[in-house]
Amino acid sequence: MISSLAVASRPGARRDRPSTPARRRRAVGLVGAVVALAVAATLSVAVGSNALSPAEVWHALTAPSGTLTDQVVLDLRVPRTVAAVVVGVALGLAGALIQAFTRNPLGDPGILGVDAGAALFVAIGVVLGAVSAVQFLPWAFGGALLVTVMVTAIGGSGRGGPDPARLTLAGVALGAVLLGVTNAMMLLNPVTFARLRGWTAGSFVERGWDVILPVLPFVGAGVVVALACARSLNALGLGDELAIALGSRLVRTRVLSIVAITVLAGSATAIAGPVAFVGLMAPHIARWIVGPDQRWILPYTMVIAPIVLLLSDVIGRVVLWPSEVPVGIVTAFVGAPVLIALVRRTRASSL
């Protein structure tokens, strides 16, 4: 009886059975987003210190002959583009999970300190001998997991479950402390951390296949776990009591969400360093397009976040040409106004 009343009364009852035209519009929109992602990836391969024509890019991809242009495309720009796509998918999904899991519209791996925790542990790993992105992975996972658990525990203390305001304050405070510790370690040992200067700003420079391929299985596993949580996250968004009445397993959903957030945020940080605001912006864009249904938000976010990151990377290459601006700085410039706009809105988005 309780379950039937809950289903009948919940405001999101229609979201579980969208009409055929609504599903068709969402599917068409997702296809359009994939096309936009392909365009952004093409721009990422073609634009740089030396702009390449579409014909040159196509020749390098389909019939490479060992020329300098072919080497630039295949050895530098294609791996960089793939790295941006992988990191975008990971950060976007991690942000969407955080927002749904905590019911916090300002949830983001950067704002909640997850990136800072991963970066601190990577710095500790460097002190202990880690020298490559592959060796960064376990350290990044450990830092991301620790901070996710700590912020969730602090923000979830008291009655009513996780509170968005407490979560945000705990994440910002903890992230600031961890970032300060990381910067202090780098200043005290500049020789050891010289190669991490660009990484700490968030960058795809010199990210080759040796960095990307070992991380792909972890990102793939995180994507599978995140998508498997979509329906349960819909129930969780209604509140704990209604979610239990609807048969949702809250503990399992939260554990799986934390695992996915840890793997995705840790993988992204190991590749590119801390990149802020992508995980904040992409889920909100997806939510504005498809509504509050996580079964659509997560796939849309997987496409929108790489688009945002690729375009930010392209902007970073040309805004101070021939020099480059790290992508993490570009996303901060773009994301800060978005954050301010979300904070000023009475209801940032329906979660």
Image: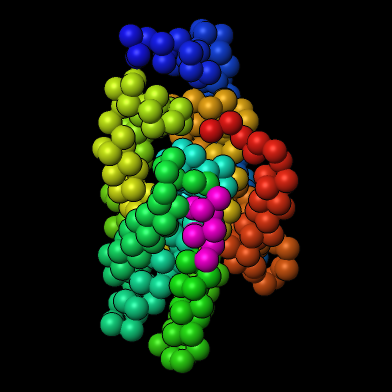
Left or right for 311, reference 91: right
Left or right for 347, reference 117: right
Q: Main secondary structure of the magenta part?
A: helix
Which quadrant of the view contains residue 119? Answer: bottom left
Where is residue 39 shown, x and y percent of the image? 60, 40
Where is residue 351 shown, x and y percent of the image? 53, 33
Residue 168 lies within the magenta run = yes
Q: Is residue 184 above or below residue 224?
A: below
Q: Which quadrant of the figure contains the N terminus?
A: top left
Q: Outermost residue, front direction?
A: 159
Where is residue 202 shown, x and y percent of the image? 53, 65
Left or right for 332, reference 252: right
* Residue range of the region highlighted in magenta in the rendering: 165-173
Residue 232 lies within the magenta run = no
**Frontmost residue, 71 versus 149:** 149
Which quadrant of the view contains residue 287? Answer: top right
Can see residue 245?
Answer: yes
Q: Which residue is located at x 48 percent, y 13 percent?
A: 9
Can see residue 148?
Answer: no
Q: Which residue is located at x 58 percent, y 63 percent?
A: 328
Q: Which residue is located at x 64 percent, y 60 percent?
A: 332
